[in-house]
Structures are given as structure tokens and as C-alpha cells.
Image: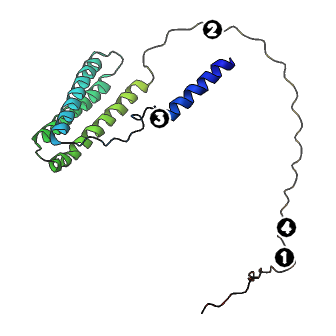
Amino acid sequence: MRIARRLGILALVTIAATGATSTAAFATTTPPVRTVASVQAHVQTRSQHIAAKMKTLQAKVAGSSKLSGVEKAKLQADIAKVVTDTAAWRTKVAAATTMVAIKAAAPARLAVTTDLAKLRSDLAAAHGKPMTAAKPATAAKPATAAKPMTAAKPATAAKPMTVAKPATVTKPMTVAKPATVAHPVTATQ
């Protein structure tokens, strides 16, 4: 055990002395510069991803037997709004030729994120409701013997509340004097 510990310490000292640590993990790298083409490619992939998710969600909602007709209609409307706003965002970014035009499409992106948040909350509300279908009957629990009742303790009289007396000032406060300098000041020319 001592030999293994010494070898481990020796290896750590050798690594520290030679500087063979992983500097790539600690190196600061600058983020890549965003270009119009890179933003357009990113928006294109995000919009395709959102469209694919909405298509599968639309099929799930339509085929769900647990959702009521009103809930299905509300969710389908939310999904349609997400799809149309995503398409609008994608076309605004695709038509952009400068970064200023890309930044001008920010309200369209915000509309997509707002629609997605509303869809998530509506989905949670639809799934969080108690089921209207009857639950299957469960077996009754066996009865347990009741505990014997005990007499209640007599109530005790509450103690009267005492009010604290205001503090009285016995002697006035004194302010400490500033400290004096013990060494003399020497004059310079």
C-alpha cells in the first residue's frame, strides 16, 4: 500500500513538474462569430425540429381517447399557431441579408417561444385533470378495532400576559473622545 501511494505521489509530482496537464480544458476560446448564413442554418434546423414535433403531437392529440373534444380543439389550435408562427419566423430569417435584419426577426422568435409555452401549459392542464371515467372498484380494507376513548384533560387557566416595562435610562450616554497622536509632528523646511 505504501509503495502504491508513493508511486502515485511520484506520478503526480512528475506531471506537475513537466506541465503535462490538459490545457485544452482550461483554455479560453472565443465563441464562433455568428454570420447570417449560420443563423439561417440554425433557424432552419430549429424550425424543422419544431415542425416534426408538432406533427407527431398533433397525431397523438387526435388519437387520444382520454382528452375531451374541447381539450382536443384547444390543443389543435395551439399546435396550428405554433406551426404558423414557426413558418413566419423561418421566412423572416431566410429573407434576411444582414445581421440587423436577423435581429429584426426577434419578435417572430419570441412569438414562437410564447406559443410553445402556452401549448405546454395547455397540455399540462389537459393531463392534470382528474379522469372522468369511473375508477375500478377496490377491495374494502378490513375493519380494525377501535381504540378505547380516554377522558379529556381538564383545561388549565391561561396565565395572564405580562407586558414588559419600558427601559429607563439611568445615566446619559457619553461619546468617546478622539484619540490623540502620541508622536510629535516634525516640521519640514
Q: Amino acid at mark 4?
A: Lys
For residue 8, side relative to residue 82 (left or right): right
- Residue topped by disc 2: 140
Q: CA distance from mark 3 to mark 1?
A: 69 Å
Is mark 4 in CB contact (under 8 Å) with mark 1? no
Is mark 2 in CB contact (under 8 Å) with mark 4? no
Is mark 2 in CB contact (under 8 Å) with mark 3? no
Q: Amino acid at mark 1?
A: Val
- Residue topped by disc 4: 165
Q: Picture coordinates of residue 81 (x, y %)?
A: 22, 34
Q: Nearer the viewer, mark 2 or mark 4?
A: 4
In this view of the protein, which residue sits in the foreground, 147 or 103? Answer: 103
Q: Picture coordinates of residue 181 (x, y %)?
A: 73, 82
For residue 25, side relative to residue 72 (left or right): right
Q: Answer above or below: position of 137 versus 2.
A: above
- Residue topped by disc 3: 19
Q: Picture coordinates of residue 28 (x, y %)?
A: 37, 42
Q: Answer above or below: position of 89 versus 162.
A: above
Q: Residue at x 56, y 29 (%)?
A: 12
Q: CA distance from mark 4 to mark 1?
A: 12 Å
Q: Residue at x 47, y 35 (%)?
A: 19
Q: Earlier in the sequence, mark 3 or mark 4?
A: 3
Q: Residue at x 60, y 6 (%)?
A: 139
Q: Earlier in the sequence, mark 3 or mark 1?
A: 3
Q: Nearer the viewer, mark 3 or mark 4?
A: 3
Mark 3, other Cα within 10 Å: few <14 / some 14–19 / many ≥20: few
